[in-house]
Image (cartoon, rainbow, N blue to C red):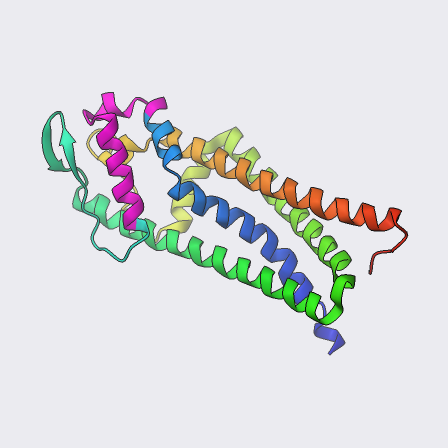
Amino acid sequence: MNRVAWIPAFLFVFAVPLFLVTASVAWAFNDPSVYNRGFQKYRISLATGITEEDLRHVAGQIRHYFNSTDEPLLVKTQVYGEEREIFNQREVKHMHDVKRLVWWVYAAAAMSGIYLMANTSWGLAVNGPRFLGELAQRVIRGVALMGILVVAVGILALSGFDTLFLRFHQLAFANDLWQLDPRRDYLVIIFPQGFWFDATMRVVASTVSGAVALTLASGGYLLWTRRAGKGVPC
């Protein structure tokens, strides 16, 4: 029994960064401001002939697609005053792959979040308030693990986002449907690479903010218990 006693704690430490990262990614995919700021910053309306209002509607249809079982993706809007479907079959098929990836992100966020809550509830039920010290230590270890990953990704993104973006697509997708033409394919015209760089940085910022909040709460509790002379379980 003692040989496997470390497994729940190990899984908890691993689940902390997994939840922080996937929850931040899920938030970014569903936050209208991420889309709207990107459209304004990269002047997508001028590049496409789609009004700002219609671009917001397009983004809303894409978010709905990600969060529903509707297939295939069908987005109609006015381009230079003429209503048309803006995504061709290659883009539609790629978005099906993207949707599947987004759902994996949702699943990872849900499963890691559920495990964190279940492990915490079980620990408190079995050990009572004494578990809080161990919980704080696990959280800090998980945040430390996440910090290493975020710093590594951040350095790669800042030093060569083009390469990072390319490697991600090569690893995440089993086909070449993501190789689109920026001269005619609206998916890459509406969402240029700069958009994804900004979105990645927002995910990093959100993840780091959550990590800082957890560190302050956990570290503050450990400091308080030491000063109060209560000790912390090892």
Residue 228, given in percent of the width and then of the height, sits at 88, 49
Is 34 inside the magenta-drawn segment? no
Report the side of 209 relative to 186 (left or right): right
Q: Is residue 206 above or below residue 39?
A: below
When the figure is inspected, residue 30 is found, relative to residue 233, above or below; the finding is above
Please provide percent x and percent y for residue 169: 38, 45
| 47 lies left or right of 122 | left
From the image, which quarter does the N terminus lie in?
A: bottom right
Residue at image point 75% right, 59% down: 134
Q: Residue at x 19, y 40 (%)?
A: 87
Q: Position of residue 139 (x, y in %)?
A: 68, 52
Start-end of magenta stretch: 40-65
**Residue 41 falls within the magenta-colored stretch:** yes
For residue 86, what is the image quadrant? Answer: top left
Q: Is residue 214 left or right of residue 33?
A: right
> Is residue 131 in view from this perspective?
yes
Residue 162 visible to the viewer: no
Of the pair 86 and 218, the residue shown nearer to us? 218
- Counting from the top left corner in percent of width and height, residue 143 is at 65, 47
For the point 14% across and 31% down, the residue is 78
Q: Nearer the viewer, residue 118 or 26?
A: 118
Query: Does the magenta stretch mainly form a helix, a strand or a loop?
Result: helix
Name the residue at 18% across, 24% down. Answer: 49
Extreme left residue here? 82
